[in-house]
Image: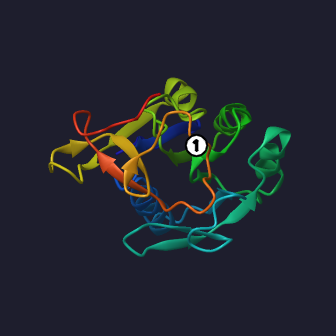
């Protein structure tokens, strides 16, 4: 898929929730290991869905990861935790601050292959930084689609549901006592309630 060179590069795997981003990230890491390449995997401190130090996909695959702070200069801790690995993976890039862009650029300039996955849109359908910035500086970008949970068409949006209804655009991140869940939706079935 990618040329073997002596220079580094950035690969971004993006798309909506349930599109297989982490599954694709893990597939690339397995291939890197088969090729005898040492791999370092990082995940943000606030994502513990599959265990505190695990990157996992909805299909059950997982990989041990190092947890790094996702805010501010703490993202640079990722560089400090490397031990010579030439392949560096970052899952859930959308939970990191924009400092992740500089970190990835630094790693690629150091001759490393940097593989990043994360959703590129918020539930409102707006850019979810820093992923769009990473897309702009990456050598390789793959945007995956899921299946719309309403009509079955290709989905590219994250539908946030609060108590089974589309979320309001101005809803806070966490609503106390409310049931929150997400679905993949196509452009036509995606809804955001506005006041």
> Is residue 80 in view from this perspective?
yes
Q: Foreground: 130 or 86? A: 130
What residue lies at 63% left-to-right and 67% top-to-bottom? 48
Viewport quadrant of the N terminus: top left
What residue lies at 80% left-to-right and 57% top-to-bottom? 81
Name the image quarter holding residue 171: top right
> Is residue 113 in view from this perspective?
no
> Quick check: 107 left or right of 14?
right
Q: Foreground: 134 or 35? A: 134
> Quick check: 115 left or right of 159?
right
> Quick check: 35 left or right of 67?
left
Vertical side of 90 occupied by 54: above or below = below
Which residue is at the far front? 195
Residue 10 location, x and y as percent? 54, 37
Q: Foreground: 157 or 8? A: 157
Name the residue that disc number 1 marks.
94
Vertical side of 122 occupied by 29: above or below = below
Residue 100 location, x and y as percent? 69, 38
Colour scheme of the picture? rainbow
Local crowd size for mark 1, using a 10 Å CA cut-off: few (<14), some (14–19), many (≥20): many
Residue 72 location, x and y as percent? 81, 38
Residue 25 location, x and y as percent? 46, 56
> Quick check: 41 left or right of 57?
right
What residue lies at 45% left-to-right and 68% top-to-bottom? 34
Name the image quarter holding residue 182: bottom left
Vertical side of 6 occupied by 63: above or below = below
- How many badges with numbers are in the image? 1
Label 1: element kind: helix
Name the image quarter holding residue 96: top right
């Amino acid at each position: 898929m990618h040329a073997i060179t002596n220079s580094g590069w950035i690969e971004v795997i993006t798309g909506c929730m349930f599109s297989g981003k982490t599954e694709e990230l893990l597939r690339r890491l397995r291939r890197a290991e088969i090729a005898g390449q040492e791999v370092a995997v990082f995940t943000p401190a606030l994502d513990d869905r599959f265990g505190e130090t695990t990157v996992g996909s909805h299909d059950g695959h997982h990989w041990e990861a190092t947890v790094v702070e996702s805010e501010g200069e703490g993202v640079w801790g990722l560089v400090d935790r490397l031990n010579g690995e030439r392949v560096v993976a970052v899952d859930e890039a959308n939970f990191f601050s924009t400092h992740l862009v500089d970190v990835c650029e630094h790693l690629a300039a150091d001759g490393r292959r940097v593989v990043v996955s994360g959703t590129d849109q918020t539930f409102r359908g707006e850019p979810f930084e820093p992923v769009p910035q990473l897309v702009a500086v990456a050598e390789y970008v793959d945007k995956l689609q899921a299946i719309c949970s309403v009509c079955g068409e290709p989905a590219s949006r994250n539908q946030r549901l609060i108590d089974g209804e589309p979320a309001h655009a101005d809803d806070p991140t966490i609503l106390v006592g409310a049931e929150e869940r997400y679905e993949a939706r196509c452009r036509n079935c995606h809804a955001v309630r506005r006041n």
